[in-house]
């Protein structure tokens, strides 16, 4: 049954596809996995398998306009359509697994969505992990570019204004070729509206980072050309959390879960989760 966004949402009536990966035993905690721009949840099957092996249930959804969900690819009416989806997924998870600790993992734009979500829902989570979060753009836009983006967002909201280079996804050529061949991956341009909404969400997270106090692990590839590593450093420096950690991986590109070193990255993820779950949730 899809998640249907409520009437008070910017994406009202949209049907959002979601999926659960469950471990063979009773789960000790639940991970909400928030995917990035232009991709879809099934690109995280291998991540979910690693988490399942550690006794963790994993839930994810395709954002508005992504994957198998309804909406227009490359566009969003308002950034809140994304965070409304996460809130709806959270409600599903809490109903299915009452009382279990929750961990939030967000990649790229999903890291920005996750950080925005935490501004109002951090009390729900035992911890959060952000992978290559889009806290700052790869190139800071000029004031003129921001003005033009806002103007186009009003006049031509679906006009494509920004393309991304798929070669920046991973140093593994098979990952890049699979990405380009995947029919559920959107390879068109980011619309004027989505660009404006993302810039505004970035500025909000930067301005309000001090209010986020949930334990957080921030991971980023040093050679990420799609989301600035400086954004992760800025978030780490300004987080209000007394329990925070950042790791910048030398040489890695944007999708650190899809780099040749993915096993080591995922070991860092599971090790951090183990250290941040209540003792009762650890084997």
Image (cartoon, helix red, strand yellow):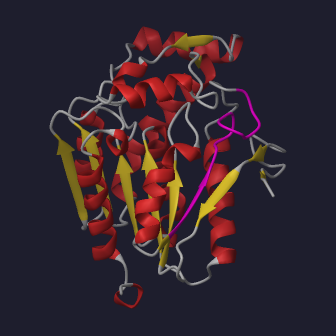
Q: Which quarter of the image is occupied by the C terminus? A: bottom left
Q: Is residue 171 left or right of residue 164?
A: left
Q: Residue 165 colored magenta?
A: no
Report the span colored magenta.
57-72
- Could you say where residue 46 lies in the image, as x and y percent from the top left? 45, 52
- Could you say where residue 26 lies in the image, as x and y percent from the top left? 54, 83
The structure residue drawn at horizontal position 39% and vertical position 91%, both measured from the top left corner, is 280
One can see residue 234 in this view: no
User: Looking at the image, is 90 positioned above or below residue 76?
Assistant: below
User: Looking at the image, is 158 positioned above or below residue 52?
Assistant: above
Q: Which quarter of the image is occupied by the N terminus? A: bottom right
Quadrant in which residue 82 is drawn:
top right
User: Looking at the image, is 234 positioned above or below residue 193?
Assistant: below
Q: Residue furthest left?
A: 250
- Could you say where residue 124 lies in the image, as x and y percent from the top left? 52, 71
Q: Residue 59 colored magenta?
A: yes
Q: Which of 35 and 185 lies nearest the eye of the viewer? A: 185
Q: Which of 268 and 194 lies nearest the eye of the viewer? A: 268
Q: Is residue 275 left or right of residue 153?
A: left
Q: Which of 33 and 77 lies nearest the eye of the viewer? A: 33
Q: Is residue 102 left or right of residue 279?
A: right
The structure residue drawn at horizontal position 31% and vertical position 56%, both measured from the top left corner, is 266
Magenta stretch prevailing secondary structure: loop
One can see residue 145 in this view: yes
């Amino acid at each position: 049954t899809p998640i249907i966004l409520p009437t008070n949402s910017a994406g009202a009536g949209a049907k959002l596809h979601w999926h659960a990966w469950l471990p063979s035993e009773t789960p000790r905690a639940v991970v909400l996995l928030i995917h990035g721009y232009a991709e879809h949840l099934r690109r995280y099957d291998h991540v979910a398998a690693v988490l399942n092996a550690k006794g963790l249930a994993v839930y994810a959804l395709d954002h508005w306009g992504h994957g198998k969900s309804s909406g227009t690819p490359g566009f969003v009416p308002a950034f809140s359509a994304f965070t409304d989806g996460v809130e709806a997924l959270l409600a599903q998870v809490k109903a299915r697994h009452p009382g279990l600790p929750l961990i939030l993992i967000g990649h790229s734009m999903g890291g920005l969505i996750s950080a925005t979500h935490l501004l109002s829902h951090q009390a729900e989570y035992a911890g959060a992990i952000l992978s290559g979060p889009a806290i700052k753009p790869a190139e800071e836009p000029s004031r003129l570019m921001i003005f033009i983006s806002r103007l186009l967002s009003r006049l031509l909201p679906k006009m494509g204004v920004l393309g991304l280079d798929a070669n920046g996804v991973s140093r593994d050529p098979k990952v890049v070729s699979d990405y380009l061949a995947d029919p559920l991956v959107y390879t068109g341009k980011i619309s004027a509206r989505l660009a404006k909404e993302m810039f505004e969400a970035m500025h909000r997270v930067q301005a309000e980072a001090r209010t986020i106090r949930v334990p957080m692990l921030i991971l980023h590839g040093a050679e990420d050309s799609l989301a600035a590593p400086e954004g992760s450093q800025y978030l780490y420096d300004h987080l209000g959390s007394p329990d925070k950690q950042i790791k910048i991986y030398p040489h890695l590109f944007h999708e650190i879960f899809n780099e040749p070193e993915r096993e080591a990255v995922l070991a860092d993820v599971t090790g951090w989760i183990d250290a941040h779950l209540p003792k009762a949730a650890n084997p």
